Image (cartoon, helix red, strand yellow):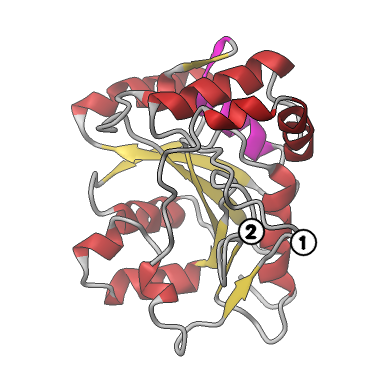
């Protein structure tokens, strides 16, 4: 990328069918479409993106994911099952990304406006930041609206240096465990909504998402509309309230 040109911004959605608690979850139905389709449709509405790529594995179990991508015309990269950092690096390299956005396929309420905000913070931060996200220095959005954005140079450096298999499985821990080496830009909401759980890892999570999607009947709603819906139906939040939240470490 030459100075002054707009960075080619690629969202990479990591997806596989090998979930232990909810097998095949990213292909489960949400209001008549697979969860992965709902995620892709929502991510694609982010105006900051040039391309959205699905990054799955080379495992035979994920052939069904690759087939869905082919049927829908979605770019798909297949790589390592456990070394997700390598999968991201090679997908970004293949699709000539200058700026990479990381999204998980089990987040069917992912919000395009939040993607645009995180990408904007990374692009516009002066002095230049290496990495931006909306979970550091602390999470303030519901779990499931998580967005990370980083330059390809950041990704390639981490790919070369990170030797911790557990970190490589989660792509970016090397960055936030070395705050002296990386300039990190946090994006905070003005209300702390982090107790809400809007991701899908259990049958209870799926039940909440199905209630939300049934209420709208489509995936074109905003996350603020979901808040309004849940304020009108507070009992829905009890469905998965007991599931422990993951904390960035």
Contact (CB < 8 A) between labels 1 and 2? yes
Quarter of the figure that contains the N terminus: bottom right
Image mark for residue 148: none
Q: Residue furthest top?
A: 32
Name the foreground residue: 70 vs 35: 35
For the point 65% across and 63% down, the residue is: 7
Quarter of the figure that contains the C terminus: bottom left
Q: In the picture, residue 137 is in which quadrant? A: bottom right
For the point 75% across and 28% down, the residue is: 229
Q: Position of residue 6 (x, y in %)?
A: 72, 64
Q: Is residue 179 above or below residue 36?
A: below
Image check: 57 left or right of 5? left
Where is mark 1, residue-wise? 190
Q: Position of residue 43 (x, y in %)?
A: 63, 39
Res 98 seen here? no
Where is mark 2, residue-wise? 140
Q: Which contiguous range is marked in magenta?
A: 32-44
Q: In the picture, residue 164 is in which quadrant? A: bottom left
**Residue 188 falls inside the magenta stretch:** no
Q: Residue furthest bottom?
A: 180
For the point 57% across and 9% down, the residue is: 32
Q: Quick one: SS at disc 1? A: loop
Res 247 seen here? yes
Q: Position of residue 211 (x, y in %)?
A: 61, 18
């Amino acid at each position: 990328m030459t100075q002054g040109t707009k960075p080619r911004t690629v969202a990479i959605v990591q997806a596989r069918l090998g979930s232990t608690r909810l097998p095949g979850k990213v292909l489960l139905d949400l209001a008549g479409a697979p969860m992965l389709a709902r995620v892709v449709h929502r991510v694609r509405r982010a105006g900051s993106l040039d391309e959205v790529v699905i990054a799955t594995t080379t495992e035979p179990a994920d052939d069904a994911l690759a087939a869905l991508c082919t049927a829908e015309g979605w770019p798909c990269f297949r790589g390592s099952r456990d070394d997700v950092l390598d999968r991201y690096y090679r997908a970004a390299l293949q699709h000539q990304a200058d700026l990479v956005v990381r999204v998980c396929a089990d987040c069917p309420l992912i919000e395009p406006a939040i993607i645009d905000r995180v990408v904007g913070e990374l692009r516009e931060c002066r002095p230049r930041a290496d990495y931006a996200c909306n979970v550091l220095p602390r999470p303030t959005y519901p779990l499931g609206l998580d967005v990370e954005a980083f330059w390809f140079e950041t990704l390639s450096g981490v790919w070369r240096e990170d030797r911790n298999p557990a970190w490589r499985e989660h792509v970016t821990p090397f960055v936030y465990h070395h705050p002296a080496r990386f300039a990190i830009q946090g994006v905070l909401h003005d209300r702390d909504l982090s107790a809400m759980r809007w991701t899908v890892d259990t049958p209870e999570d799926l039940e909440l998402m199905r209630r939300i999607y049934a209420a709208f009947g489509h995936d074109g709603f905003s996350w603020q509309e979901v808040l309004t819906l849940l304020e009108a139906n507070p009992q829905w939040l009890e469905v998965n309230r007991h599931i422990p939240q993951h904390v960035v470490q």
